[in-house]
Image (cartoon, grey):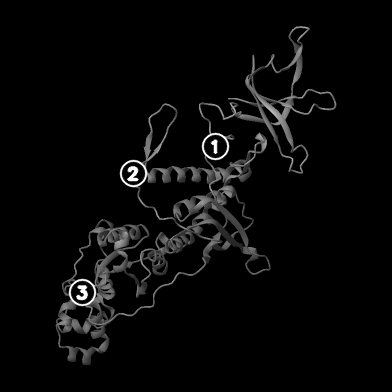
């Protein structure tokens, strides 16, 4: 037997709920068989129950989420009209009763005690039926069918038969629009950013329902507003883009980011109309629970710590949310993410980009998580036995040479806050001849050096002695 769920949307969508159309968009994430039936939204979920862990789990999930979207009540039955009748009878229940609606498979048992208004075709004749002594749908159905049809028309019988599964039900299934672009005329003029943010919240809830139906997220929002003086003039709408670190459909997060952006915008005049649209959407990955916990080493010598997949997602979401906020408050040019490059030259082995645009690129090379400039260390040293510095100078600093040794074996030693002692090296690099930029080509011998005052240093000697007679030694980096 088919399994239908009926949802009664919020009575007043202005106070935080969704209307029937947008609640239907949201319901499309559970099944493609969603329709609007009078004031309710009905879903046929029989084919989807196995995908969500069974009928009980799907019922609980739909009810819990629908209640969060402002739905007043929910009911389940074997036909759409029966579910509609049940949800009308239960619309007075409080939110604590929403998840405890009894699920019976006997349509006659479910429908018989319901009052007449639960079926529209029967409810419009309620006054006459009351004079006949009929107070419930079961009493109306017990009347002779011929007399009932002649007295009230065939519509009453058709409604009763459809609710009891004796007559096929036909619907125009709800379809999602291919793009989201909504415009709203405000009830009054808005002249401050906080009020404008509250006006956008309704459009954001509708966007969340649209994204849920697509099972996707968005990474860029386009906000638009029309000023009072430009409404009937030639001026265009003002638009503002809100980029995000990763695609999301979380309405709360979208609302926070929109609020952060709007607080930094000065309105030149009162706003009368607003619009919200998205450029692209990204299909949301299915979150499958992992059978085994993932192990992540917390440090050298420490015991491995177990992380579940949900903990990893929560940690990543918190970091990306922080990047979003920092990029808005400090500016995207001040929040950077590193991108590793396949280059032996230390200054070219990592490039920095604005974190938000960099995270939007495909591939795992760009990440907000810190990674070393050099390849992975083994016992603290590279295969060349020369570790990489923590801090690299943008321009290498020339080092003074001082003669050391006896007169017969005089040699020149670089100096930086004392004579340098070469601990490891040379690590020869000869690369960059393919670049046209001046100074891109390098022919250097790198050394790990120790200074009496400055500690460990990263120095190199130019393989080609400068023609001006200056020192070939340069200081390139420091170790933390």
| Mark 1 to mark 2 CA distance (whole Å) | 26 Å
Q: Residue 384 placed where, x, y %? A: 60, 28
The answer to which quarter of the image holds residue 222 is bottom right
Residue designated by label 1: 371
Neighbor class of circle 3 (other Cα within 10 Å; few <14, some 14-19, many 20+) is many
Q: Residue 434 placed where, x, y %? A: 73, 43
Ranked by sequence position, the earlier of labels 3 and 2 is 3
The mark found on residue 292 in the picture is 2
Q: Is residue 57 above or below residue 1?
A: above
Q: Is residue 6 above or below residue 383?
A: below
Instruction: Specify whether 209 is left or right of 159.
Output: right
- Can residue 192 be seen by looking at this rendering? no
Q: Is residue 100 above or below residue 402?
A: below
Q: Secondary structure at mark 3?
A: loop
Q: Nearer the viewer, residue 132 or 219?
A: 219
Instruction: Specify whether 195 is left or right of 292.
Output: right
Ranked by sequence position, the earlier of labels 1 and 2 is 2
Name the residue: 36% across, 60% down: 70
Neighbor class of circle 1 (other Cα within 10 Å; few <14, some 14-19, many 20+) is few
Instruction: Specify whether 374 is left or right of 295.
Output: right
Residue designated by label 3: 115
**Mark 3 or mark 2, which is nearer to you?**
2
Neighbor class of circle 2 (other Cα within 10 Å; few <14, some 14-19, many 20+) is few
Q: Secondary structure at mark 1?
A: loop
Q: Residue 71 placed where, x, y %? A: 34, 62
Name the residue: 80% across, 26% down: 465
């Amino acid at each position: 037997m088919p399994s239908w769920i009926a949802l009664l949307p919020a009575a007043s969508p202005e106070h935080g709920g969704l209307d029937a159309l947008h609640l239907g968009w949201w319901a499309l994430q559970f099944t493609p068989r969603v329709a609007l039936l009078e004031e309710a939204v009905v879903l046929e979920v029989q084919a989807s129950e196995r995908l969500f862990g069974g009928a009980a789990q799907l019922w609980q999930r739909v009810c819990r989420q629908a209640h969060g979207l402002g739905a007043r009540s929910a009911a389940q039955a074997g036909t759409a009209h029966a579910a509609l009748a049940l949800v009308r009878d239960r619309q007075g229940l409080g939110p604590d009763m929403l998840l405890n609606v009894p699920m019976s498979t006997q349509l006659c048992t479910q429908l018989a005690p319901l009052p007449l208004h639960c079926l529209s075709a029967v409810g419009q004749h309620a006054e006459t039926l009351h004079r006949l002594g009929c107070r419930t749908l079961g009493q109306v159905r017990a009347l002779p069918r011929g007399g009932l049809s002649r007295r009230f028309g065939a519509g009453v019988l058709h409604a009763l038969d459809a609710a009891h599964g004796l007559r096929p039900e036909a619907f125009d299934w709800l379809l999602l629009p291919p793009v989201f672009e909504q415009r709203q005329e405000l009830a009054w003029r808005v002249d401050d950013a906080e009020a404008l943010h509250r006006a956008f919240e309704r459009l954001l809830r509708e966007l969340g329902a649209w994204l849920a139906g697509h099972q996707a997220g968005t990474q860029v929002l386009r906000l638009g507003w029309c000023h009072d003086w430009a409404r009937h003039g030639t001026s265009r709408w003002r638009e503002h883009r809100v980029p995000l670190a990763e695609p999301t459909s979380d309405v709360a997060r979208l609302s926070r980011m929109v609020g952060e952006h709007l607080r930094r915008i000065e309105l030149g005049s009162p706003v009368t109309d607003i619009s919200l649209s998205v450029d692209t959407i990204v299909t949301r990955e299915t979150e499958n629970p992992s059978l085994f916990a993932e192990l992540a080493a917390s440090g050298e010598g420490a015991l491995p710590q177990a992380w579940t997949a949900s903990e990893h997602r929560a940690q990543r979401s918190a970091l990306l949310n922080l990047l979003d906020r920092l990029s808005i408050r400090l500016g995207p040019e001040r929040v950077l993410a590193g991108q590793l490059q396949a280059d032996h030259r230390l200054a070219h082995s990592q490039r920095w980009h604005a974190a938000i645009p960099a995270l939007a690129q495909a591939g795992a090379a760009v990440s907000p998580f810190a990674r070393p400039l050099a390849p992975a260390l083994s016992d603290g040293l590279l295969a060349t036995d020369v570790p990489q510095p923590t801090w690299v100078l943008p321009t290498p600093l020339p080092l003074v040479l001082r003669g050391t040794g006896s007169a017969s074996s005089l040699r020149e030693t670089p100096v930086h806050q004392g004579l340098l002692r070469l601990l490891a090296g040379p690590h020869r690099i000869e690369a960059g001849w393919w670049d046209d930029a001046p100074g891109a080509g390098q022919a250097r011998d790198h050394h790990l050096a120790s200074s009496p005052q400055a500690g460990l240093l990263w120095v190199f000697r130019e393989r080609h002695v400068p023609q001006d007679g200056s020192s070939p030694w340069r200081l390139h980096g420091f170790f933390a």
